[in-house]
Image (tube, rainbow, N blue to C red):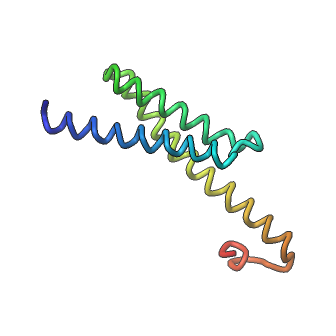
Amino acid sequence: MQTETILRRGLLALVLIGTAGLAVELVLLEHTESTLQWIPLAGLVFALVCGIWVLVRPARRSLQWFRTAMIAFVVLGVLGIYLHLRGNASFELEIDSSTTGTALLLA
């Protein structure tokens, strides 16, 4: 087997292990209370399915879907950062309604 093939399979295995681990972590943390909290789980399942498809049948089509899943990770990551910042800000405002600006973001 070529070095490039071994490297690609190794990286794919790392992505699959990390994705599965994160999915398990979110389930154990009960990250399922609202519809918005199901979005990352759906993205992780989508990526797992695409990754396994690439592992079993590495073809142009499966790789395109896997790339789509990786782009979705970036988009969902940005969405997750926004939603967590919004949630943290509203929590801080409940504690101290006079907090504003940078202090609110850093709290």
Residue sticking out furthest to the left:
2
Left/right of residue 95 with respect to residue 72 in the rendered view: right
Left/right of residue 89 with respect to residue 19 in the rendered view: right
Q: Where is residue 106 in the image (x, y as percent from the top left)?
A: 65, 75
Where the N terminus falls, by quadrant?
top left
Q: Where is residue 83 in the image (x, y as percent from the top left)?
A: 69, 54
Query: Along the line of sight, which residue is nearer the eye, 93 or 7?
Result: 7
Instruction: Determine the residue positioned at 40% across, 28% down.
Output: 64
Q: Position of residue 97 (x, y in %)?
A: 86, 75
Instruction: Determine the residue positioned at 44% across, 44% down.
Output: 18
Determine whether 81 is above or below 75 in the image.
below
Left/right of residue 46 with respect to residue 102 in the rendered view: left
On the image, which quarter does residue 10 sit in?
Answer: top left
Left/right of residue 36 with respect to residue 1 in the rendered view: right
Instruction: Determine the residue positioned at 73% across, 64% down.
Output: 88
Query: Along the line of sight, which residue is nearer the eye, 76 or 28?
Result: 28
Instruction: Determine the residue positioned at 68% across, 72% down.
Output: 105
Q: Where is residue 9 in the image (x, y as percent from the top left)?
A: 27, 35
Q: How many labels does the image show?
A: 0
Where the C terminus falls, by quadrant?
bottom right
